[in-house]
Image: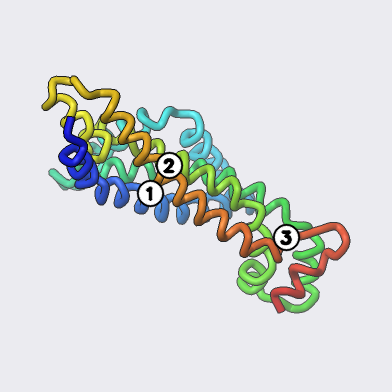
């Protein structure tokens, strides 16, 4: 098998794979922020709905969530008279965004709750507004706590992007299967080995970026000796 031909063919599908990953990463992060805020505030009914969403995202296999998005979204938009709106790529982005948002919420919520109550009280005593307290005091400490779990969530997301081939999205995995079928499945081991290297590189890059931010956020780590240290760092 000529790798000089196969590898460029696989790499031609990499932009779509990265686009799906990045879209799900950003949209999922926003969903996780909103969901976490609703769950922490404990608003009647709304918080329970947020808990239900997180339970769905964590309990239902990702491939089934993709099927729900692919087959359910056309029914939803069809109510408003919209047709031919949903493509496999859009369904993949939607399904993975919902999955990533629910999973990431379970990373953010414990991180927020882990910030010592004294930090909140100290910020309130200094007259900080809620926005300033969250951005300057709570968020830096919660970020340091959440980053390891966030890194795992990103790696899981990269793994699960490979499932979008089941709803027809032409990602790297789908392209690899087309290449193998064209060659009458003679070079399955070689093709999957190249895919393994490719996904490993993507995960290593994501891990390196998260590790960089972990080291940068280390100065905000709370400790038992000085509760006000992160607060003073924000002044």
Q: Quadrant of the N terminus?
A: top left
Does label 3 or label 1 sit earlier along the sequence?
1
Question: Residue drawn at (30%, 41%), measured in percent from left and top?
Answer: 92
Q: Is residue 188 above or below residue 92?
A: above
What residue sits right under mark 2 in the picture?
A: 157
What residue sits right under mark 3 in the picture?
A: 221
What residue sits right under mark 1 in the picture?
A: 24
Describe residue 40's horizontal placement relative to residue 75 as left or right.
right
Q: Is residue 229 above or below residue 180?
A: below
**In this rendering, does residue 139 appear at all?**
no
Q: Is residue 205 above or below residue 230?
A: above
* Mark 3: secondary structure: loop
Q: Residues within 10 Å of mark 1 (few under 14, many from 20)?
A: many
User: Mark 2 and mark 1 in contact (Cβ < 8 Å)?
Assistant: yes
Whole-Å distance between the Cαs marked 3 and 1? 29 Å
Whole-Å distance between the Cαs marked 1 and 2? 8 Å
Does label 3 or label 2 sit earlier along the sequence?
2
Q: Tell me residue 96's x, y (percent).
A: 37, 42
Q: Quadrant of residue 119?
A: bottom right
Whole-Å distance between the Cαs marked 3 and 2? 27 Å
Question: Residue drawn at (42%, 40%), measured in percent from left and top?
Answer: 200
Question: Residue drawn at (63%, 60%), measured in percent from left and top?
Answer: 215
**In this rendering, does residue 114 appear at all?**
yes
For this orientation, the residue located farthest to the right is: 225
Does label 1 or label 2 sit earlier along the sequence?
1
Q: Quadrant of residue 88?
A: top left
């Amino acid at each position: 098998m000529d790798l000089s031909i196969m590898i460029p063919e696989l790499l031609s599908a990499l932009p779509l794979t990265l686009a799906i990953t990045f879209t799900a990463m950003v949209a999922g992060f926003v969903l996780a922020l909103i969901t976490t805020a609703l769950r922490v505030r404990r608003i009647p009914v709304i918080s329970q709905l947020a808990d239900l969403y997180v339970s769905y995202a964590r309990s239902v296999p990702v491939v089934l969530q993709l099927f729900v998005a692919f087959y359910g979204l056309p029914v939803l938009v069809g109510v408003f008279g919209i047709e031919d709106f949903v493509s496999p790529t859009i369904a993949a982005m939607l399904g993975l965004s919902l999955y990533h948002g629910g999973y990431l919420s379970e990373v953010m919520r414990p991180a927020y709750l882990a910030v010592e109550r004294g930090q909140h009280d100290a910020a309130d005593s200094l007259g900080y507004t809620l926005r300033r307290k969250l951005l300057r005091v709570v968020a830096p400490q919660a970020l340091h706590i959440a980053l390891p779990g966030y890194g795992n969530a990103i790696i899981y997301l990269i793994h699960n992007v490979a499932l979008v081939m089941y709803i027809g999205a032409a990602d790297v995995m789908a392209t690899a299967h087309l290449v193998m079928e064209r060659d009458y499945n003679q070079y399955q081991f070689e093709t999957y080995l190249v895919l393994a290297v490719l996904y490993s590189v993507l995960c290593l890059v994501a891990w390196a970026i998260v590790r960089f931010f972990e080291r940068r956020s280390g100065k905000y780590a709370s400790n038992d000796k000085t509760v006000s240290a992160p607060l003073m760092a924000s002044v």
